[in-house]
Amino acid sequence: MIISLTLYGLYIYFAKEDMMEFLTYMNEKTVTNTGNAKADAATKEFLKKVNNFSINYMNLITFISIPVFAVINLILFRKRNFIEHNIALVYAHAQYYIITALIGFLALFTSIPYQHVTTITLIFTIIYFMYFYKRLFELSFWKIILKTILFWLLLGVAYFILGIMAFIVGILFTKFFPSIFSFN
């Protein structure tokens, strides 16, 4: 895992500018215009900080996300215990990061736009993890399709819950630290 995260970290280091440009473009497309220029600017600045944090601390995010994925796997695949799911996910993520970094470096050297790299890696991610779970749990083709759909649905629910928690924390911060979030 250390080697894969190091390789992926190098890729992130060299691709950071392209990533930030792509994420800024996506933020511009998704942030709605509220009519309050200061609030819109603050939202865009906040999203820029979140994106920067995500890129700079990708390794930390990976280590935090593996137990979340393990809980989802424990719900879907009851054949193993929590520790075994964590170990399997560390192995799977190590392989994923090595291949993703290789795809990313290839894209950097051939000037493939970053949005194409994200599409390629997303497709690869879904196929790789389907293959991984098919082999690990000896599932049929249709069963792995169903489990993959359920995994993404549960992951969406988990992110939704985390988003609500982040929203509540944001409200608490604006209540107790209003000078940080003033839009006047």
Image (cartoon, rainbow, N blue to C red):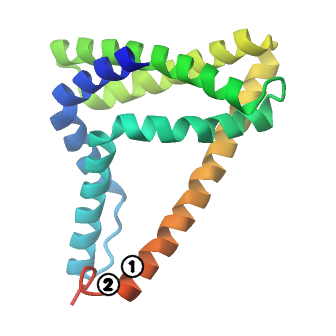
Estimate the x, y position of residue 81 in percent, counting from the top left: 77, 29
Looking at the rendered structure, which numbered label has been put on residue 131?
A: none
Residue on which the image places disc 2:
177
Q: Would residue 5 be found to the left or right of residue 180 on screen?
A: right
Instruction: Name the spot of residue 142 as percent of width and height, x first.
Output: 80, 19
Q: Nearer the viewer, residue 99 or 9?
A: 9
Q: Which residue is at the far front?
A: 83
Query: Local crowd at mark 2 within 10 Å, few (<14), some, or many (≥20)?
Result: few
**Residue at image location 22% in from the left, 64% down from the top:** 45
Instruction: Tell me if 117 is positioned left or right of 168 in this view.
Output: left
Residue at image coords 26%, 82%: 36
Which residue is at 61% across, 60% downward? 161
Given the image, on which type of amino acid does mark 2 rest? Phe
Instruction: Give SS at disc 2.
Output: loop
User: Quarter of the image holding residue 139?
Assistant: top right
At label 1, the amino acid type is: Phe
Residue visible at 42% across and 41% down in the picture: 61
Q: Is residue 60 placed above or below 51 in the rendered structure?
A: above
Q: Position of residue 103 (x, y in %)?
A: 33, 14
Q: Are marks 2 and 1 in contact (CB under 8 Å)?
A: yes
The disc at residue 173 is: 1
Query: Split into 4 quadrants, where in the image is the C terminus?
Result: bottom left
Give the quadrant of residue 115. top left
Residue 154: x %, y % from top left: 69, 44
